[in-house]
Image: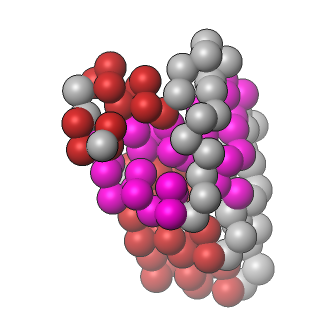
Amino acid sequence: FTDCVKTLLGAGADAGKTRTDGRTALMIAADKGFTDCVKTLLAAGADADKAERGGWTALMLAADKGFTDCVKTLLGAGADAGKTRTDGRTALMIAADKGFTDCVK
C-alpha cells in the first residue's frame, strides 16, 4: 500500500485532503494499522492532530484498534496525546477501555 501512497503523493495528491466526514488519508491508514503509510503521509505533511467531525484523530483511531506501532509513530511525530474527542475521551482513555496495555504504556 505504501508504494501506491507514494505514487499518488508524487503525482500531487494532497496528504491533508478530507472526505465528507472529515477523515484524512492519515486517519484511514492509522485506523487500519498501516504504519508505513502513516510514516509516508506524515513525511508528506499530513497533520497528526487533525480531527474528524466526531473529534477522532489518527492517534485515537490507532489506539482504538491497539495498533501500538502506529501509536508510537504518531506520538513520535508530535501528535497531541491530550487531545479529546467530542465526548471528552483521549487516546489513552480509548486504549485503556479496550485493554490495549502496549498502547497505554
In magenta stretch: residue 51: yes
How many numbered marks appear? 0
Position of residue 60 measured from the top left corner of the image (x, y, whole percent)? 50, 37
Q: Is residue 5 visible?
A: no
In magenta stretch: residue 96: no
Horizontally, residue 31 falls left or right of residue 77, namely left
Residue projecting furthest to the top? 87
Q: Is residue 93 visible?
A: yes
Position of residue 24 measured from the top left corner of the image (x, y, whole percent)? 65, 50
- Quarter of the image where the C terminus is located: top left
Position of residue 69 measured from the top left corner of the image (x, y, whole percent)? 33, 59
Q: Residue at x 45, y 75 (%)?
A: 2
- Quarter of the image where the N terminus is located: bottom left
Q: Which residues are magenta?
A: 47-76
Horizontally, residue 49 falls left or right of residue 36, namely right
From the viewer's perspective, is residue 71 above or below residue 103? below
Question: In terms of depth relative to the viewer, which is nearer, 95 or 53?
Answer: 95
The answer to which image quadrant residue 23 occupies is top right
Q: Residue at x 50, y 71 (%)?
A: 39
Question: In terms of depth relative to the viewer, which is nearer, 20 or 52?
Answer: 52
From the viewer's perspective, is residue 102 above or below residue 11? above
Question: In terms of depth relative to the viewer, which is nearer, 68 or 9?
Answer: 68
Q: Residue at x 36, y 53 (%)?
A: 33
From the viewer's perspective, is residue 37 above or below residue 21? below
Q: Residue at x 76, y 68 (%)?
A: 14
Horizontally, residue 17 falls left or right of residue 84, namely right
